[in-house]
Image (cartoon, rainbow, N blue to C red):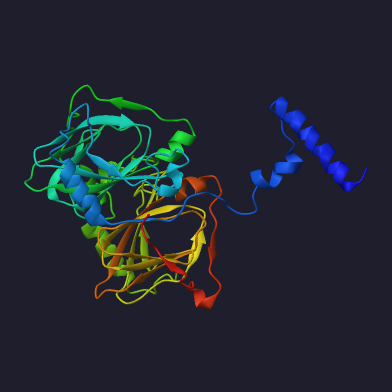
Amino acid sequence: MNQSDHRKALDQFADRLAKDHLGPLWDNLGTMVTKQPTHKVKPYLWKWQTIRNYLLEAGPLLALGRESERRVIYLQNPSLIHEGKIGYATDTLYVGIQLLLPGEVAPSHRHSQAAIRFIIEGKGDAFTTVNGEKTYMERGDLVLTPPWTWHDHGHEGTEPVFWMDGLDVGLVKTLTGSFFEPYHDDTYPLNGPADSSVARYASGVRSISERKVRGYPSPLINYKWTNIKQALEGLTRLDADPYDGYAIDYVNPVTGGSADARLGTSMQKIAAGTGTKAHRHVHSACYHVLEGEGYTVINGEKFEWTQGDFFIVPPWSWHEHHSTGQTDVHLFSMNDRPVLEILGLDQEEAYAENNGNQFIERIFQPE
């Protein structure tokens, strides 16, 4: 049998297998087990002022209650909408931006998705309650709401409050583990004084009474920006990491592991007028520009950002950050690294060409 006839025979055999919902691995191994990560996630950037204006417009149109529990506008990655992935920033991560107006209550509920809140605008008069602990939220704070914890939001001040919601929606949906339950009342009963976990843990030490606290979830639910900024300033006495600048991970003060077991969170400081070298890793990341201006190069594409903007770095994508303003840049990011590390799947690689910096081939333009 010549090569052409042999291929024809194999194709006919594959057709017969398909009729019985079977398949030949020899034809599809390379598709199923790829030589390196493959995905359809593309990088994208969203401008803060556009999001903010839409949320303020939604304010009078949407009253909060059981029919509209949250006033949130989510980031939709256009590369995933055609895959039917509504509300996905990456294959695993969801990002929404929430608005709470003075006097409002976002009703209590719980879900199996892990969630974080990063405060974009707030003066400490809005709060989140997590399983009965009330914590007040200021700009730059990171608030945890671990999976299956009752949580609600309230506002005792006079100005609108905005924050970033980050959840592992895609991961949980893929693993078919999604559950949701509303609480029977708008608010969950308070348990102890406000910000009690901040008093016990936020200084980097713990109360003696907390010696028996173990494991997950993190006993600290609010990582205050004042403490995080101080930690970053301390790092500036050392050499900056070539790929991340001065950067820290938010951690569980009891275990030293990720603050949330499934969602990784980090803060980076890029000193004014400096930049990082390029690298890539398997985990995907969603970035928010807390302060400063500059650009990120992702796979040769330049994404220019200013304070408040959001952008996506897909898995296994070359990326580097550069500060172009007169002040330091602070970048908050959420990622799926903890899950990949548990599974032994995360890898990292440095960019070897051009002294570690990519060639800029194009400048991002929104679709």
| Up/down of 188 relative to 158, above or below | above
| Up/down of 252 relative to 22, above or below | below
> Is residue 17 visible from the viewing direction of this image?
yes
Residue 270: image x %, image y %?
33, 69
Left or right: residue 285 compared with residue 271: right
For the C terminus, the image quarter is: bottom left
**Toward which corner of the image does residue 268 lie, by quadrant?**
bottom left
Left or right: residue 26 compared with residue 334: right
Q: Nearer the viewer, residue 127 or 223?
A: 127
Query: In the image as oriented, which residue stretches furthest toward the top?
Result: 184
Residue 240: image x %, image y %?
39, 72
Residue 107: image x %, image y %?
20, 31
Residue depicted at x 31% and y 25% = 181
Query: In the image as oriented, which residue stretches furthest toward the right?
Result: 1
Q: Nearer the viewer, residue 8 or 217?
A: 8
Residue depicted at x 35% and y 76% = 274
Q: Nearer the viewer, residue 252 or 355?
A: 355
For the N terminus, the image quarter is: top right
Residue depicted at x 47% and y 70% = 361
